[in-house]
Amino acid sequence: MAELSIAIAFAVRLLLVLLFLPFSALDKVLNFRGAVGQARERVPNASLARVLILAGLFVEIVMSLGILTGIADRAAAFVLAGYCGVTALLWKQFWRPGDFWAGGDSKGRGLFWDFLKNFALAGGFLLITFGTGAETVRLFLSHPLASSQPYRITPSTEPAGAAR
């Protein structure tokens, strides 16, 4: 039963980071020039666009690994939540095309759903960061680099009255 619990905990975390590691990170590596071109849509300076893509690559790889391994996973999840919010605001600007209220499929409407997905993903990362209760929020605020120890099994995690 312990192995199944650990596998499920890992799978849930993998689902959260799968977009970034390997897919988005790999896309940035294999299509670096295109990624810089996309960044230049918001930042006209080519050097700054390159720095932003490299910083994004760092965040996607290192923070995802932190979440998967449990090493400073709360801080890593906090950074990825912020990353999701910032990328939504910079690259998912559904209000810009001006066709959000147009009938049928529109660029603005497609961006709107991507915008919301980014913030929903940020919410998932914040669940790792803060947990679901006041005590876990307090723990993060007092020790932000501590691990949530996602793969530790203790007898107290078993529901009362569970069959053994």
Image (tube, rainbow, N blue to C red):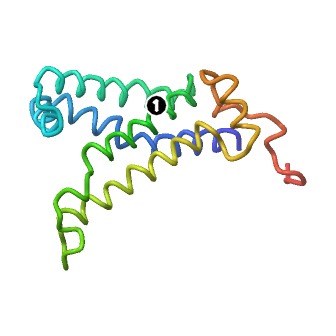
> Residue at image x 17%, y 64%?
98
SS assignment at label 1: helix
Q: In terms of image quadrants, where is residue 138? A: top right
Q: Is residue 11 visible?
A: no
Residue that protrudes farthest toward the right in the picture: 161
Q: Does 37 sit left or right of 162 as displayed?
A: left
Residue 134 left/right relative to 127: right
Depth check, front residue: 23 or 99? 99
Residue at 25% x, 59% y: name it.
Answer: 95
**Which residue is the site of mark 1?**
79
Q: Quadrant of the N terminus?
A: top right
Image coords of residue 36 (percent x, y): 14, 31
Toward which corner of the image does residue 144 lie, by quadrant?
A: top right
Residue 4, horizontal then vertical, whole percent = 63, 44
Question: Residue 51: image x %, image y %?
Answer: 22, 21
Tell me, yes or no, if residue 152 can be seen here: yes
Q: Residue at x 83, y 50 (%)?
A: 159
Is 89 in front, or is 118?
89
**Height in image: 46 above or below 123?**
above
In the picture, measured across the screen, residue 87 lies left or right of residue 131, that is: left
